[in-house]
Image: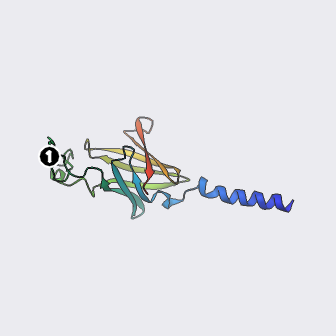
Amino acid sequence: MKYACFLLILTSAAAIPASAAGPDGILGTWLNQAKDAKIDVFQCGNDYCGKIVWMKEPDYPPGSKNGTPGTPRLDRFNPDLAKRSTPIMGLQIMSGFQFAGGKVWNNGTIYDPDTGKTYSSKATLVSPQELDLRGFVGVSMFGRTEKWTRAK
C-alpha cells in the first residue's frame, strides 16, 4: 500500500510540469515553421515579446529584384514608410503576449515582415519543444496557426 501511494505521488509530481508551463515556459529561441528564421522570445515588462535573431538568408541573394544583392533584407512592406529601411534581422515581430495560465499566452500581436501586416495573436505551448502561434484578424477562429520548434 505504501508503495502504491508513493508511486501515485511520484506520477502526479511528474505530470505537473507537462500540464502547467508557467509564465516563462515560452522564453527562449524558436525556429519558425518554415525553418528559415529563429525568434528569441523574451520578457518585456510584464509581457512577452519576440525578435528575429537568425535568418537562413539575412541578405538579398544574387539577382534579387527586392533589394541590392548582398545587402541586408529590409522591412520593405512596413506600412510606416519611415521603417521600410529597417533590417529584418533584429526586428521585433511579437509583442504584448500575456500569460493566461496553463500553457497559453494571449493578447499579443505578431508582425509579418513578408506582408507588412500585424495580426492579433495567441501562443500555446504544446510541449517544451513545440509552440503553436495563432495569428488572426478579429476572432481566433478566423486565422492561421504556425508550429514553431525550440531551437537547439
Please tell me which residue lies in front, 91 or 79: 91
| Amino acid marked by disc 1 | Gly
Residue located farthest toward the right when viewing the structure as drawn: 1
Left or right of 14 on screen, residue 67: left
Q: Residues within 10 Å of mark 1 (few under 14, many from 20)?
A: some
- Expressed as whole percent of the image width and height from the top left, the position of residue 51 reads 33, 56
Q: Secondary structure at mark 1?
A: loop
The answer to whether 30 is drawn above or below residue 65 in the figure is below
Name which residue lies at 20% across and 45% down. 79
The answer to whether 146 is drawn above or below residue 82 in the figure is above
- Expressed as whole percent of the image width and height from the top left, the position of residue 63 reads 14, 42
Residue beneath disc 1? 67
Name which residue lies at 25% across and 44% down. 116
Name which residue lies at 72% across and 60% down. 10
Please tell me which residue lies in front, 107 or 43: 43
Residue located farthest toward the top when viewing the structure as drawn: 142
- Expressed as whole percent of the image width and height from the top left, the position of residue 80 reads 19, 49
Quadrant assignment for the N terminus: bottom right
* Quarter where residue 34 is shown: top left
* Quarter where residue 145 is shown: top left
Name which residue lies at 26% across and 50% down. 57
Left or right of 67 on screen, residue 51: right
Residue located farthest toward the left when viewing the structure as drawn: 68
Residue located farthest toward the front when viewing the structure as drawn: 62
Quadrant assignment for the C terminus: bottom left
Left or right of 21 on screen, residue 84: left
Please tell me which residue lies in front, 109 or 77: 77
- Expressed as whole percent of the image width and height from the top left, the position of residue 23 reads 50, 60
